[in-house]
């Protein structure tokens, strides 16, 4: 029986997808692997555009004004990115524990942050 890892991050992929991905790591574009070509090259940009399009299609958001972003970093990085991209003057945070503490800490770098409640 195949084992599955259901912890945060990884997912279960069909073998056909993993096979195609592994082949691209060996030879994607005339002898170069996907991780050896420039992230600005046309072949790589085409891969990213197709991935963005498929993500929106799968979520039913295509043609509705949304864009798909692929960003590196884990949850802690996202706390900083949310603050950097969404805060304008001030924000209220409900502090529910460890993860809220981290989000509040990052947001305080950019704006006035108010803890509206602690649970």
Image (cartoon, rainbow, N blue to C red):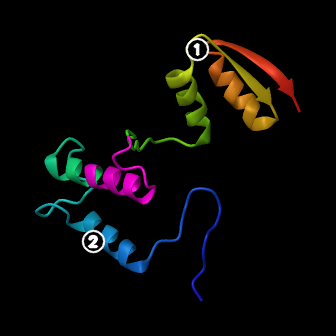
Residue of label 1: 110
Q: Nearer the viewer, residue 61 or 100?
A: 61
Residue 27, x across and y down, in percent: 20, 66
**In the image, which disc is placed on residue 26?**
none
Q: Residues within 10 Å of mark 2 (few under 14, many from 20)?
A: few
Residue 15, x across and y down, in percent: 41, 79
Quarter of the image with the N terminus in it: bottom right
- Helix, strand or loop at mark 1: loop
- Secondary structure mainly formed by the magenta segment: helix
Determine whether 19 is above or below 83 in the image: below
Q: Nearer the viewer, residue 100 or 67?
A: 67
Residue 87 forms part of the magenta stretch: no
- Seen from this angle, which residue lies furthest left? 30
Determine whether 30 is above or below 85 in the image: below
Q: Residues within 10 Å of mark 1 (few under 14, many from 20)?
A: some
Residue displayed at 34% across by 76% down: 19
Marks counted in the figure total 2
Residue 103, x across and y down, in percent: 68, 29
Quarter of the image with the C terminus in it: top right
Residue displayed at 39% across by 44% down: 68
Mark 1 vs 2, N-terminal side: 2
Q: Nearer the viewer, residue 103 or 22?
A: 103
For the residues marked 1 and 2, what is the alpha-carbon distance in whole angstroms? 43 Å
Question: Pointer 1 and pointer 2: residues touching (CB < 8 Å)?
Answer: no
- Asked whether, in this view, residue 74 is left or right of residue 63, the answer is right
- Helix, strand or loop at mark 2: helix
- The mark lying in front, picked from 1 and 2, is 1
- Asked whether, in this view, residue 9 is left or right of residue 92, the answer is left
The answer to which quarter of the image holds residue 70 is: top left
**In the image, which disc is placed on residue 23?**
2
Which region shows up in magenta? 49-64
Residue displayed at 51% across by 41% down: 73
């Amino acid at each position: 029986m195949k084992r599955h890892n259901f912890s945060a991050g990884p997912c279960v992929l069909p073998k056909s997808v993993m096979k195609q991905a592994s082949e691209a790591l060996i030879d994607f574009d005339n002898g170069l692997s996907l991780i050896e070509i420039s992230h600005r090259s046309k072949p790589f940009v085409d891969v990213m555009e197709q991935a963005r399009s498929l993500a929106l299609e799968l979520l039913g958001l295509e043609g509705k004004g949304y864009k798909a972003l692929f960003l590196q970093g884990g949850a802690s990085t996202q706390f900083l990115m949310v603050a950097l991209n969404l805060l304008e003057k001030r924000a209220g945070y409900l502090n529910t524990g460890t993860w809220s503490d981290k989000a509040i800490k990052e947001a305080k770098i950019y704006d006035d942050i108010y803890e509206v409640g602690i649970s």
